[in-house]
Amino acid sequence: MEDEIILRKQAVELYLSGFSISDIAQKLARSRQWVHKWITRYRTKGGDDWYKSESTLPKQVPNRTSTNQEDLVINVRKTLSGQRYSQTGALSILYEIERMGLKSPSISTINRILKRNNLIHTSSIEQRKGIEYPSHFTLVQQMDLVGPRYLTGGVRFYFQNIIDIGNHHVGIYPIRDKRSITIARSIVRFWTTYGKPDYLQMDNELAFRGSNRHPRSLGIVLRLALSQGVTPIFIPPSEPWRNGVIEKL
């Protein structure tokens, strides 16, 4: 780098001595564009550091997140942190912003904002000496229904997805309808292959919970779960982030 700086200074000295651009380029074994660049830098910038390299980073970053959006994400993150049992990840922040009636940045943008402001914390359970930890854990599976989707010709179908939270075994079942009996058959297929959980967590899809006409009756899915010793859990309405693993899938 020092040799390069010496050449830049020599180019200007030769120019001030009356040498032409072509002669300077030939003497220093540099291109005419290179000579033009440093003579122009000397004439326009001047000072004692004209010969130093400048950053090539763009002066303005395209698509940079606005200050207002960044402040919004940070404030929502802090609000969620202060609420008991609230999740504070990017997906939860996105849903909360949209619930407020505002346009939310994308998940990747929210994650960048959180990382830039040191708001991403990984939790870990520390093993303390002298304390015996249990060797078993609660088995939870999450279930979700996606659709309807359509094939060419107007054929309608759904995806029934089930995932084991512990080992991330996944069952994805394309089904023609979302009747409770159809849902129950897919659950039986998954449990036959991967085993039954302690808890089956799902949203408030009508096929999962039963009937609007008879809201106090148990639907087929609930009866199936309870008959197998599985406790059904329904997440709060309009809060899909509670089922975050299956929603991300």
Image (tube, helix red, strand yellow):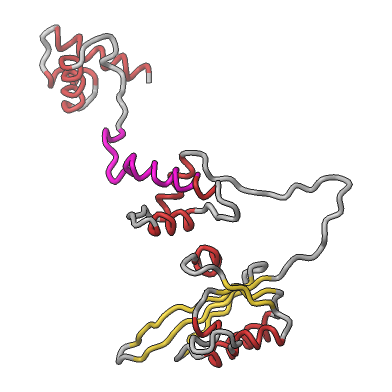
Q: Position of residue 224 (x, y in %)?
A: 65, 88
Question: In which image quadrant can residue 190 be found?
Answer: bottom right
Which residue is at 72% across, 85% downward? 228
Q: Position of residue 215 (x, y in %)?
A: 54, 84
**Magenta run includes residue 18:** no
Which residue is at 49% across, 65% downward? 239
How many numbered marks have been drawn onto this rendered protein structure?
0
Which residue is at 38% across, 43% downward? 70
Q: Which residues are magenta?
A: 57-78
Q: Which residue is more in the foreground, 138 or 222?
A: 222
Q: Position of residue 5 (x, y in %)?
A: 32, 16
**Quadrant location of the N terminus?**
top left
Question: In which image quadrant can residue 19 be found?
Answer: top left
Toward the top, the furthest residue is 17
**Magenta run includes residue 76:** yes
Q: Is residue 90 left or right of residue 233?
A: left
Q: Is residue 104 above or below residue 36?
A: below
Q: Which residue is more in the foreground, 3 or 121?
A: 121
Q: Position of residue 235 (x, y in %)?
A: 56, 69
Q: Is residue 129 left or right of residue 187?
A: right
Q: Is residue 230 left or right of residue 52?
A: right
Which residue is at 42% across, 53% downward? 108
